[in-house]
Every structure is written in structure tokens, then in C-alpha cells.
């Protein structure tokens, strides 16, 4: 029968548009095999089309959506037919309806200048060769993008090497691809990359919180000791007090911050710049004003106790500084959300560290054998009550700062 090529191609396009990888089958009957196999690849009889379904994982679409909310732009680079690539990209949410698919032939026709103008807007590439993959990565990097590239074949190795982060497939990937990549994905699941991004952001947040806590605490100690003589007051802290604060009050809760859960909006933030300072987004300003507040509360208490003739003024200052830092560590568990929203027990390790530190601090005051070691004296109940009340000032001040941030009255710029 005569072959209707247009109808055959239309059927192939229709199948490809459904996300199928299409193969055409044909035959030719011969009495003997030809000497040159290429001679057999002519005068064929068309038999039909076969569509192969390679559906994306169920969690892939959700992972792509989470990428987009996190400011990460997924780009598909495939050797499939453009119609197949479009169907899969639309199914995953990589490509919007009516979005553009660029083929390798079209990409080859672009000049470097034209491609540089369009590379940010292209989401799907089809029928590309290995050299074009490298060109895509280079163009994105030249446009200021930080690129991560996934691949599994030998042909992907150059692009994996060129990308800022090359991610090779651990199960189906070749040895060459794994050697060229910076990371190996053991389960070959794109959603795992998104989970890794989320976990990386959580770890980075917790590092910032640890630095914020320890440096603010040290700042409070420095201001308290440095400013006291200028106000006509004796040195409020002894070396043993500073050592206790640094080892116990700073150490235990600070380490427990590493177990803090990811914040609610962690995957709704834009990616940070690689060269961004860790003290960006108002962090250093926070350390300055909270450190001054700690020092101010301690010096106010010292001035009052000193001038009223209290014999326990030094123990009171020591206690207020320790408890103020514990209030601070509870308040900075989230950049924006109130502690009352995230819950006291959502980080049990930190709660245990805070309660344990409070008990240890009280032990330095009320265990007789510890008094000569820490140069402390038991406080009266009214003195302890004053210390407890004043030590909450830092907690409520930081909570007020977060309230202003949530209302948009404070904008944390890098």
C-alpha cells in the first residue's frame, strides 16, 4: 500500500504530545542478506508506531512546585522529541501552557548574543547534543545564575563538570558521570535534591542562629564589664562567672540549636547569593542592640543594688545575665515566628538544655559547696524575683522585633 507519510507523522506527533516516546517499525523481506546492511534500509514496509511510556515519579511534580516557590528554576534538557518533552514538562509544571520548547537545531542557529538574551526565559530544550548542554550551562552562568546539572550518561559528564553543582545518578548513572559530578544521587530521585535543598537551608539557618546567640551573649558580657567603670560601678563579673557563662550558658543551649526544625517559610525564600555575608539580613544589627540591651539591664540592676547597699549585687548581675541569654536563645529559634506559635516543646533538646542550665545556675546560688567556687551568695526570694523579671526583658524585646518584622515595619536587608 502507498505510504501516507503525512498521516504517519501526524500520528507520531499525537502520540508524542501524550508524553510517549515513539518508535516506528518497518520491515523488508529478502532471500539473502545483503553485503552492506545499509542496502537493507531502503524500500521498507511500514508496520506501525509504538509509544513507550516512561512516567515521572509521583513526587516529581510536587518537587518541581517546591523548587519554584523556593526561587529555583527547573530547566529540562532532553534528547526526546519536542512534543514529548513539552507534554512531560507541562505535566511536571516545568512549562506553562503555551511555553516555548527550543530544539537543538534552533539552539545551533542562535548567536551567542541572541542566546544570552533568551536563556533566562527558556525552560525546555529538546533534541540537544552534549556540546549544547555545556553551552546552556555556560550561558546561564554568564547570566549570573548558579547552576545545578543532573545527568547519568557519558555524554552528560562535560556539562556535569562545568556546572556549579553536578549531580550524577547513583543507580543508573555511568562511572564517567559519577566521577565528573560533585554529588551522586543514590536513589536517582529528583525529589531527593529538593529535600537536600531544604535540609541545607535548615542547617544554614541553625548555623546563623548559633552565631547570633553566642556573639550576642559575648557582646552582652563585654558591654556589662566595659561600661561599668565608666558609670562609677565596680567590675560586675569575675573570671569564674565568665567561664561559667561561656561553657554552660552559651554551650548547652547553643549546641541544642542544631536540632531546630526548618522554619515554615524556608522553601518560600529566594536563594541567597553565594558571596552573601553570614551576618546579612539584619543579623549584625540584632547582635549589637540585643547585646547593648543585655548590658543595660545588668548595669541597671547593678547600679540599683549597689546604691541600695545590697550585699548580693554581684550574684544578682551574674544571674540576670545568664537568664537573659536563655531568654534570648528561646526567642531566636525563629527569624519571624513567635515562640508561642512554634511551641516550647518543638525542640525538646533545647528545652532540656534551657531547663538544665536554669537548674545549674540556681545550684551555683543555693548549693553551699558551690558558693565559694563561684563566689556567689544565696539570693533572697525578692531578689530572685527581681532577677527573674528583669531577665525576661531580652526575650520580650526580641519577640517585639519579630512582631515588627512580620508586620513589615522592619525590613531586613542584607
Image (spheres, rainbow, N blue to C red):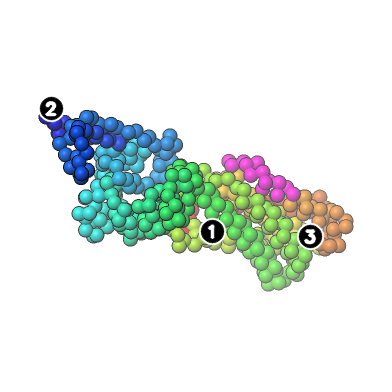
* Total residue callouts: 3
Point 59% across, 51% down: residue: 332
Give residue 150's position: percent from left, percent from top.
40, 49
For the question of whether residue 329 can be seen, the reply is: yes
User: What stretch of residues is rendered in magenta?
Assistant: 340-356
Mark 3, Cα crowd under 10 Å, few <14 / some 14-19 / many 20+, is: many
**Which of the 4 quarters of the picture holds residue 189?**
top left
Secondary-structure class at tag 1: helix
Q: Which mark is residue 1?
A: 2
Residue on which disc 1 sits: 283
Q: Residue furthest top?
A: 1
Task: Tell me if 278 is positioned left or right of 394 in this view.
Answer: left
Q: Residue furthest right?
A: 369
Q: Quadrant of the N terminus?
A: top left
Q: Between marks 2 and 3, how big is the CA–CA gap?
A: 103 Å
Sequence-wise, the earlier of marks 1 and 2 is: 2
Point 21% across, 58% down: residue: 111
Who is closer to the viewer here, 284 or 72? 72
Does 342 lie within the magenta span?
yes
**Which of the 4 quarters of the picture holds residue 272?**
bottom left
**Which of the 4 quarters of the picture holds residue 51?**
top left
Amino acid at each position: 500500500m502507498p505510504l501516507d507519510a503525512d498521516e504517519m507523522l501526524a500520528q507520531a506527533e499525537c502520540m508524542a504530545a501524550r508524553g510517549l516516546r515513539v518508535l516506528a517499525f518497518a520491515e523488508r523481506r529478502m532471500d539473502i542478506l545483503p553485503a552492506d546492511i545499509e542496502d537493507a534500509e531502503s524500500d521498507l514496509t511500514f508496520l506501525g508506531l509504538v509509544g513507550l511510556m516512561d512516567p515521572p515519579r509521583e513526587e516529581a511534580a510536587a518537587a518541581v512546585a517546591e523548587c519554584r516557590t523556593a526561587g529555583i528554576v527547573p530547566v529540562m534538557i532532553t534528547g526526546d522529541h519536542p512534543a514529548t518533552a513539552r507534554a512531560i514538562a507541562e505535566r511536571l509544571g516545568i512549562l506553562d501552557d503555551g511555553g516555548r520548547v527550543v530544539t537543538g537545531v534552533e539552539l545551533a542557529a542562535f548567536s551567542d548574543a541572541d542566546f544570552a538574551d533568551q536563556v533566562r526565559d527558556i525552560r525546555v530544550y529538546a533534541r540537544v547534543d552534549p556540546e549544547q548542554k555545556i553551552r546552556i550551562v555556560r550561558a546561564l552562568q554568564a547570566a549570573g545564575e548558579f547552576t545545578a546539572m543532573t545527568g547519568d550518561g557519558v555524554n552528560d559528564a562535560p556539562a556535569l563538570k562545568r556546572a556549579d553543582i553536578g549531580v550524577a545518578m547513583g543507580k543508573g548513572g555511568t562511572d564517567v558521570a559519577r566521577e565528573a559530578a560533585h554529588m551522586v544521587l543514590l536513589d536517582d530521585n529528583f525529589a531527593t535534591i529538593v529535600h537536600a535543598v531544604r535540609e541545607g537551608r535548615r542547617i544554614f539557618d541553625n548555623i546563623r542562629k548559633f552565631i547570633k546567640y553566642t556573639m550576642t551573649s559575648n557582646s552582652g558580657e563585654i558591654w556589662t564589664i566595659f561600661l561599668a567603670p565608666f558609670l562609677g560601678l565596680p567590675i560586675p563579673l569575675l573570671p569564674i562567672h565568665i567561664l561559667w557563662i561561656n561553657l554552660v550558658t552559651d554551650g548547652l543551649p547553643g549546641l541544642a540549636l542544631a536540632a531546630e526544625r526548618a522554619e515554615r517559610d524556608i522553601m518560600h525564600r529566594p536563594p541567597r547569593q553565594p558571596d552573601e555575608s553570614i551576618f546579612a539580613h539584619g543579623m549584625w544589627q540584632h547582635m549589637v542592640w540585643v547585646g547593648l540591651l543585655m548590658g543595660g539591664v545588668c548595669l541597671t540592676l547593678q547600679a540599683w543594688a549597689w546604691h541600695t547597699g545590697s550585699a548580693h549585687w554581684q550574684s544578682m548581675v551574674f544571674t540576670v545575665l545568664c537568664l537573659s541569654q536563655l531568654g534570648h536563645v528561646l526567642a531566636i529559634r525563629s527569624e519571624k515566628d513567635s515562640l508561642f506559635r512554634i511551641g516550647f516543646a518543638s525542640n525538646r533538646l533545647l528545652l532540656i538544655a534551657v531547663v538544665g542550665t536554669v537548674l545549674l545556675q540556681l545550684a551555683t546560688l543555693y548549693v553551699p559547696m558551690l558558693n565559694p567556687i563561684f563566689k556567689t551568695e544565696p539570693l533572697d526570694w525578692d531578689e530572685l524575683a527581681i532577677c527573674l523579671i528583669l531577665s525576661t526583658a531580652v526575650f520580650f524585646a526580641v519577640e517585639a522585633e519579630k512582631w515588627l518584622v512580620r508586620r513589615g515595619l522592619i525590613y531586613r536587608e542584607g
